Amino acid sequence: MPQSESRANSSHADATAQNSGETTPLLASGRLLPTESSEPLLPAPSQTPPTRRSGTQSGRRRQRQQQNDRTLKVDRKWWSQRARYYVPIVGWLPNYSIGNFAVDVKAGFVVACLLVPQALSYSSLTHLPPEHGLYAALVPTLVYGLLGTSRHLSMGPEALISVLTGTLVKGQLKHFIAGSSPNTPSQEAIDRFSATVATAVGLVTGLFTFALGIFRLGFLDSMISESSLRGFISGTAIVILIGQARIVLGIPTTSDVVHSTPWNDLTYMVSHLRETHAMTAAISLGALALLRLIYATKAHFTRARWLQNIPDTLVVVVLATAISWAAELGEKHGVVIFGKVDGSLPRFQLPHVPSYGDTKDIVSSGITITMIGVVESVIVAREYASRNHYAVSSNRELVALGVSNAVGAAFGAYPAFGSLSRSKLNDRAQARSQMSGIVTAILVGISLLGVLPYLYHLPRGVLAAIIVDAVGSLLSATPGTIAFLFHVQAWSDLFLLLFICFCSVAASVETGILLAVIISLTMVIKRSNMPRIKLLGRSTENDNDFYPIDGAPPVPSRRMRRLSFDSASDSQEEAYEENMPRFRNVNQDSATSLSTNAQAQHVEGVLIVRIEEPLYFANAGQLHARLNRMEMYGDMRTHPSEAPRMNPTRAVVFDLIGMSGIDGSALEILINIVHEYNRRHVQVVFVRVCEDVRVRFKQAKMDSEGGQYDFSDIGSALAHLEQQLSSLTS
């Protein structure tokens, strides 16, 4: 009962006891005890406790339990969402349609028929035993099937990555052989050392790629220019062709030739053409011709689906092995054959840097391999995701690629990335999910256990012919790129492509990729360091119109806007697109275009400068120098060796229509520029300042520093300056 009622009852009981002359026992607390003549006011100890207090406690317990259940449910939902995001198989496997399984199995089988011969072939580029090529095709492909977001990307060894790995292994072998002198290491020791180096660089590659994904640096795949990348790929393809041409022709080699530069390989091959092994050249060139014939037949009969699904590479391998076995090419004719290869599954072993190995070289090579592999893999993943109408995340792809290589390195694999040719085949086979990649990995594992013994008689020249055929696709795009650059007169890009290609062939592959990276980053830094500004002039037809002095179109195309904002945020680009078309001094809905009869003329004594991008520490540093050049010549196209042609500047108008932001360093530079102008008694005003920049100006007290920023258009600013200058003159 309520406390007021309880107290009232107690008082009534006391009064009754006093009036009747009876004594009522009390508790130590002063509360009444029940007597025989009175009804108990409190329940006896044996009776039920107060229901309201008990109900309140049980209600609180139920609320806490419900809250804990809701928290647990939210946690489970959060973890479930994160698991589906970072481990995609958790998301797509429960919803996997059994009807797609047959299609994925067929696609996995078709890709495996190409992957197994390629893996065996590419292992020769790495100077590793053939089984390591299959290890690189097995473990990374399986792990990517669990973590990858692309349904069509085919993981495994690639020619470009294999030759980079082989270049590292070849360089480390020099240290190993020199450190083992005067004793000559056995072939088994050389193979073991080479495998250790390859797995170490695989681990570095995996960790570096994983870090790029975790820190959301997927945008770095676009830091290498297309010309630099094409030049490097072309040069590397030529290097591969030179190295494999010796094997195709059967020209004998020595250890000095194996460890020499590509240019020395070429001169050696040309000088020893008379030592060509006729039977090796015949079987190898015949295999290459058969591959090209099958490709041409498929291209001609595009509607024959059964023909498109024929595994051409597997057909060539089977036929060459059968002919070699029947004709005993290895025993009777001296053809170098595949031989006996260990066909066991890989065992777990933590990668490490071997003795006589150079950690710095391994780490630098791992970073280089990561850059090349990531660019190709992400491009291929995006391409086929766009074709098949699903989305991939660059950062999640980097995580999947990194984990695949790190786990693969622990099982004897060298670096592996996505392949354009195999992904194209996977798409053509209509793969529906990542299950096709898992099937491919299972088939590669079966090949390791049961197929390798049957390849004993396969001529190694045929494997070299398969590599030559695959490398041809790397060079196929180069002539078109050169023709395009020549047609559009992009001489700097054309020179860059040819220069990097030449350096890759004449010096080394490492030199080529190093130059490609350095030159590309230098170009990025240079262009981001130059602020995008325009000098405006007044139209001869309308005093309220202002256009660039150099006659550039007032409305840039969407493509040019995108290229100009590679480093800007989406919000900055939207602000740029929203504001840039309005070059008129008056508000209007549509952009104006400069009439054929109108011209932009300088406003006497006034410099009108439009800043077309946000200013930050990198691009603001050159702002002062560019403004000085505009003051002297009035046109950025004028060479600085000419004499100044502009009258003294009395005022500067900064049109900030495209400047959606400014950082602290750039703001300090801009204030120093205003100070310099004020010291020279030059008026400075800012027009069309966005709200974010206006707040920064207010915080920095720009108006007290001499820069006024309350003008909404150029016309009002010029009117204000005219009054100021006329008053100063008078």
Image (cartoon, rainbow, N blue to C red):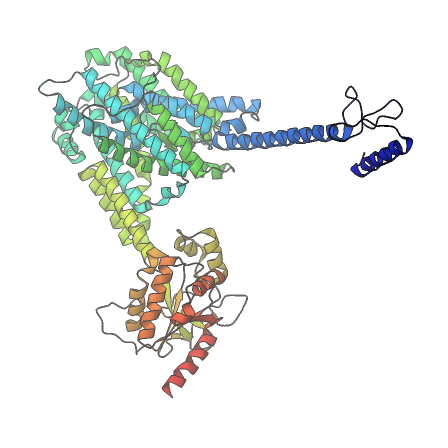
- Residue at 18 percent of width and 25 percent of height: 356
Whole-percent x, y for residue 505 in the image: 20, 38
Say above or below: 276 vs 368. above
Is residue 312 in view? no
- Residue at 31 percent of width and 28 percent of height: 202
Q: Quadrant of residue 628?
A: bottom left
Looking at the rendering, in which quadrant would you find the C terminus? Answer: bottom left
Q: Quadrant of residue 158?
A: top left
Residue 717 in the figure: left or right of residue 360: right
- Residue at 67 percent of width and 28 percent of height: 61
Whole-percent x, y for residue 232 in the image: 27, 40
Looking at the rendering, in which quadrant would you find the N terminus? Answer: top right
Depth check: give the residue in front, 5 or 606.
Answer: 5
Q: How many marks?
A: 0
Whole-percent x, y for residue 689 in the image: 46, 65
Is residue 243 in view? yes
Depth check: give the residue in front, 418 or 147.
Answer: 147
Residue 613 in the figure: left or right of residue 645: right
